[in-house]
Amino acid sequence: MTTILTDTKLQGIAEKVQHGERLSIEDGLYLFDSPDLLGIAQLANQVNYNKNGDNVYFIQNMYINPTNVCEANCGFCGFKRKPGEEGAYTMDSAALLQYVEERWNDNIREFHIVGGHNHEVPFDYYLDTIRTLKKHYPDVTVKAYTGAEIEFFSRISGLSMKEVLEELIKAGLDTLPGGGAEILTERYRLKMSPDKASTDQWLEAHEIAHNLGLKTHATMLYGSIETKEERLIHMDRLRQLQDRTNGYMVFIPLAMQPRSINAGLKRRTTAYDDMRTLAISRLMLDNFDHIKAYWINIGVQLTQMALTFGSSDIHGTLIEERISHSVGALTSQGITRDELIYLIKSANKIPVERDTFYNTIKTY
């Protein structure tokens, strides 16, 4: 495939990409500054094609947020509630099962579970959530609890993070989602999520999970106070861990949502930034198989465009997403399988329905 570059300064980076050489943070900074967005897209598209061909993956999954009570005070969150605050909730087993039953269809293959850091309930509550779902839906993969939640569980239980993960695995945990990473620098975390796991603790939780045999996910929440260099440091820390464990399946850049659905354009990430960040992620994270375009945050049309900017996954049906919609997400809370297939096919790509671990269920 021929790459046409209007920015001749990109040629050195293009040669590194074409020879499979790892890009540096300095290379990444130039990619963020280059005016040749389409040239960067072509490079990312080629890298993705070499890894995945024309296949684009999706899953039929259901989001579950068992509690929104949270001890943390993150600068970007509209989901959390304090104990006793209006709108605060914590599902017991009966409420959890009722929630799932009301939204269930037989094609769902994954429960995606994240929630507040609820210090009003013991660690056993979080174990029982998994046990209950596994008992009633034994064939559904449980993707539960972020690296930040694992650190929180360690604090409330008195167990090490390894012991926490071992107990969760016994209860039926299959994989960790990628949330809680935000931006993996301490400057950012001290300002935006000071009550949650540090950079090292989040990475440690995933490294322990990988060493215990779990494949996991990784995210990056971009579009607030972080610098472009911090985005690249975040990617570099992830790829260093991936070098050691090969435990990550996919990287998911998440566009920051404003506090209000009525927020103007200046409070949202731009289409240019979204597409550039996805493409740069594909180029920097050479040891990740997949880059996911998260349609909840960037919308379905940009998600479709992302399929030529290095993305090989458009996530899933979700059924009812709450966290991004508790702030300013403008998208619907769920999408059908037929709509996902249409988005992929009309981008001249091949829709592949997958399970959590990228095993093919059906090619359309």
Image: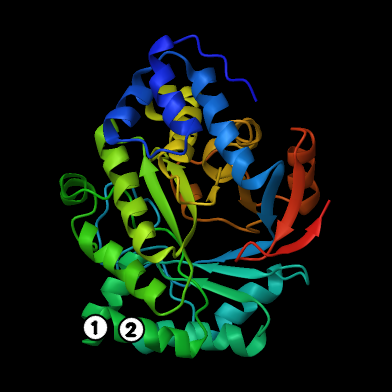
* Circle on res. 245: none
Vertical placement of residue 140 versus 171, above or below: above
* Residue 242 position in % (x across, y down): 39, 58
| Residue at image mark 2 | 164
Dots 1, 2 in contact, CB < 8 A: yes
Q: Can residue 293 be spotted in the picture?
A: yes
Q: Amino acid at mark 2?
A: Val
Q: Residue furthest right?
A: 364
Where is residue 347 shown, x and y percent of the image?
74, 32
With 354 as the anchor, is 47 left or right in this view? left
Disc 1 secondary structure class: loop
Secondary structure at numbered mark 2: helix
State the image quarter where residue 31 is shown: top left
Q: Give the residue type that dot 1 points to.
A: Ser
Which residue is pictured at 30% across the width and 27% down the height? 29
Q: As rendered, which of 69 and 280 lies closer to the eye?
A: 280
